[in-house]
Image: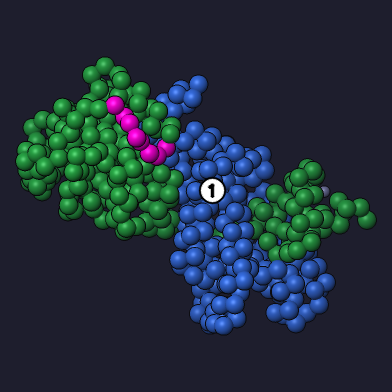
């Protein structure tokens, strides 16, 4: 049985090598129905092209979230690599019933970036040399402009305190306890702002395509 | 409040990775056993992923991933397939002629016999066991080409090509890793001495596959800049010809 699987993986590569057109046709199916499960299955069958297609599609977003949290190109590149190599090594961790592959990959990447940011070394370095806030205000505006209109509108509907707490937590990789410290607010307040903000976002964005 | 009710309220914070310590561990272990919370978490995770805009994939990011998952030759090879006619798997004449000129050094080495290949069994191989198993099978198929890339008398890699065009490169332990900015690249030398890219093997090559349906007189291995080149600019490491 093992050699039969090998063969299919091998032919997968051959198909890619001799006929990239054919493979991109397979990828475009992902825009319609349940291609995520199909792609994950192809990755499980050691089809590197499926992984490359995923990288082409989502690598930019994965890098963006890692860079936003880490504010360091080299570390962000490491996260991108860890995310896709991790998926290659354990594609069975993706459950198509629980969300899109995009969400899955971004979740992994964000968690990894947060782990790095919270590591003692990084923490010490940040305290030594905190990121320049002015520079990132500009970058953040560009970021927001690139979001889908529906998402921008949903963010606009949040109270300022909710938006601020969510954004510090997610984009700076801070725990809600750290967010509270940063804002000089009680932990309970920050916790409930994040919670109510996220509930509003989930309500207005459910049904929106990722 | 039950454990579920308490932890359910923490899911929006969990989805943002903003929990730490006991709360983080409590949610994580509860998620192993609560479908309701898993479904709810999926909603919040979908929200967080919408806070990230789509952007073009980072340049050169894929090469790094391909080489990290090993067997990375296959993907850049597809890119290099500009040099291979997609319909017939044959080199385009004009490109092949350019390659011929540029690769005169390789051809010269072939005929100078700096590294002679010999037919051998696939011994002492390293790398992806799955690809190696397929390569071994291919090597024993009727009419298969089997050759070695020899340096100072020992094989740094073996090459197999079946009659129907399925190729394998399997490094031995003697193939030295290159710096990350460099890559090994495989070249096919046709019987009329055209030299065509067979694929990029990465800086620490593992067992890799390629495809070639034209005729073959031998193969060459060169060192190039990472990502590979259409026309070799690097130095020739070894050539293989069938014994
Ligand atoms: Zn629960």
Furthest residue toward top: B142
- Which is nearer the eye, A162 or A63? A63
Residue B50 occupies which quadrant of the picture? bottom right
| Location of residue A99 in the rendering, given as x and y in whole percent from the top left corner | 64, 45
- Residue reaching furthest front? B153
Residue B232 x/y as whole percent? 17, 49
Q: Quadrant of residue A147?
A: bottom right
Residue A210 shows in the view: no
Where is A19 relative to B138, above or below?
below
From the viewer's side, name the closer residue of A107 and B220.
Answer: B220
Q: Secondary structure at mark 1?
A: helix
Any idea which chain is the blue one in this picture? Answer: A
Q: Is residue B136 left or right of residue A45?
A: left
Measuring 49% from the left and 70% from the top, which residue is drawn there?
Answer: A72
Residue A205 in the image: x percent, y percent?
A: 67, 55
Q: Residue at x 91, y 52 (%)?
A: B2
At which x and y percent is residue A139? 51, 73
Write the residue at 41% across / 44% down. Answer: B70
Chain B is shown in which shade? green
Q: Residues within 10 Å of mark 1 (few under 14, many from 20)?
A: some
Protein image colouring = by chain
Kindly identify which residue carries mark 1.
A86
Chain of the residue on which disc 1 is drawn:
A
| In-image side of B105 versus B62 (left or right) | left
Residue A33 shown left or right of residue B110 in the figure: right
**Which stretch did the figure color magenta?**
B121-128
């Amino acid at each position: 049985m093992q050699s039969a699987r090998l063969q299919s993986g091998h032919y997968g590569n051959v198909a890619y090598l001799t006929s990239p057109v054919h493979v991109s046709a397979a990828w475009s199916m992902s825009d319609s129905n349940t291609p995520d499960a199909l792609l994950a299955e192809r990755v499980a069958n050691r089809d590197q092209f499926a992984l490359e297609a995923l990288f082409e599609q989502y690598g930019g977003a994965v890098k963006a979230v890692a860079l936003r949290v880490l504010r360091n190109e080299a570390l962000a590149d490491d996260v991108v690599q860890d995310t896709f190599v991790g998926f290659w090594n354990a594609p069975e961790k993706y459950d198509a019933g629980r969300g899109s592959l995009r969400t899955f990959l971004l979740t992994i990447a964000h968690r990894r970036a947060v782990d790095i940011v919270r590591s003692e070394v990084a923490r010490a370095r940040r305290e030594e040399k905190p990121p320049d806030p002015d520079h990132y205000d500009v970058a953040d505006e560009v970021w927001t402009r690139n979001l889908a209109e529906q998402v921008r509108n949903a963010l606009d509907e949040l109270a300022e305190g909710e938006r601020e707490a969510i954004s510090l937590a997610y984009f700076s990789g801070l725990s809600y306890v750290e967010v509270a410290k940063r804002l000089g607010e009680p932990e309970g307040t920050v916790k409930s702002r994040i919670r109510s903000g996220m509930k509003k976002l989930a309500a207005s964005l459910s049904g929106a395509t990722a | 409040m039950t454990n579920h009710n308490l932890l359910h309220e923490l899911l929006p914070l969990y989805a943002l990775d903003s929990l730490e310590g006991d709360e983080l561990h409590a949610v994580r272990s509860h998620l192993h056993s609560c479908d309701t919370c898993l479904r709810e978490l999926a909603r919040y995770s979908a929200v967080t992923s919408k806070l990230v805009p789509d952007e073009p994939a980072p340049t050169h990011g894929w090469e790094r991933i391909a080489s990290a998952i090993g067997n990375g030759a296959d993907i850049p090879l597809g890119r290099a397939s500009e040099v291979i006619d997609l319909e017939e798997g044959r080199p385009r004449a004009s490109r092949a002629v350019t390659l011929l000129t540029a690769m005169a050094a390789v051809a010269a080495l072939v005929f100078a016999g700096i590294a002679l290949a010999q037919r051998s069994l696939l011994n002492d191989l390293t790398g992806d066991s799955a690809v190696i198993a397929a390569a071994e099978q291919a090597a024993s198929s009727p009419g298969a080409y089997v050759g070695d890339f020899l340096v100072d008398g020992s094989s740094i890699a073996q090459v197999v090509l079946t009659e129907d065009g399925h190729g394998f490169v399997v490094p031995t332990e003697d193939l030295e890793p290159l710096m990350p900015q460099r890559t090994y690249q495989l070249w096919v030398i046709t019987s009329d001495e055209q030299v065509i890219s067979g694929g990029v093997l990465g800086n620490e090559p593992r067992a890799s596959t390629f495809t070639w349906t034209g005729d073959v007189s031998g193969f060459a291995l060169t060192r190039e800049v990472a990502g590979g080149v259409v026309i070799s600019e690097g130095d020739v490491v070894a050539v293989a010809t069938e014994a």
